[in-house]
Amino acid sequence: MSHLFSPFQLGPLTLRNRIVIPPMDQYSAVEGRVSDWHRIHYGALAGSGAGLLILEATAVNPQGRISPFDLGLWSDDTEEALHALLGILRAHGSAALGVQLAHAGRKGSTLPPWQGGKSAAADKGGWPVVAPSPLPWDEVSPVPLELSESEDRKSTRLNSSHW
């Protein structure tokens, strides 16, 4: 018998099998919140029989998103929406659940691939990009605002009230 369908111990977590659905960005969130698309998409995957389902890149602050349409976990609203999704997945699926916490850094503020994948202008929901260094993602991307080692959570440079 194949090991694919045998249980797998992952730290303290026992997966029912070795089938893992990796995180795949859906670019379907509304201001960081879960949408109907996520409920349908992840609902189907949770009931697929996989041992582990990892939710897509979920930004830890608005400036950390890859695109204006990425999931977030930076406010009460985004937390409540994600919590509701997890309730649905637990009630109707058997897969263990994980989430890919993310900060896009210099690759942030881009349009989805089907909209060209280039830097998003402010009128398309874009924002100033922040990263550990002032190196742009590519030759056509903006130079990111370099974060200093002393940057703290209350920085007004990032225009964020939630971290």
Image (cartoon, rainbow, N blue to C red):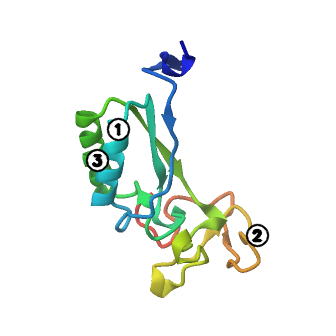
Q: Where residue 108 appears, x then y in whole percent?
A: 58, 67
Q: Secondary structure at mark 1?
A: helix
- Which label lies toward us, 2 or 1? 1
Q: Where residue 61 appears, x then y in whole percent?
A: 47, 60
Mark 2 nearby-residue class (10 Å; few <14, some 14–19, many ≥20): some
Residue that appears at 48% across and 73% down: 159
* Image disc number at residue 135: 2
Q: Is residue 90 above or below residue 32?
A: above
Q: Secondary structure at mark 2?
A: loop
Residue that appears at 44% across and 28% down: 51
Q: Earlier in the sequence, mark 2 or mark 3?
A: 3
Mark 1 nearby-residue class (10 Å; few <14, some 14–19, many ≥20): many
Q: Earlier in the sequence, mark 2 or mark 1?
A: 1
Mark 3 nearby-residue class (10 Å; few <14, some 14–19, many ≥20): many
Quarter of the image with the C terminus in it: bottom left
Q: Is residue 54 visible?
A: yes
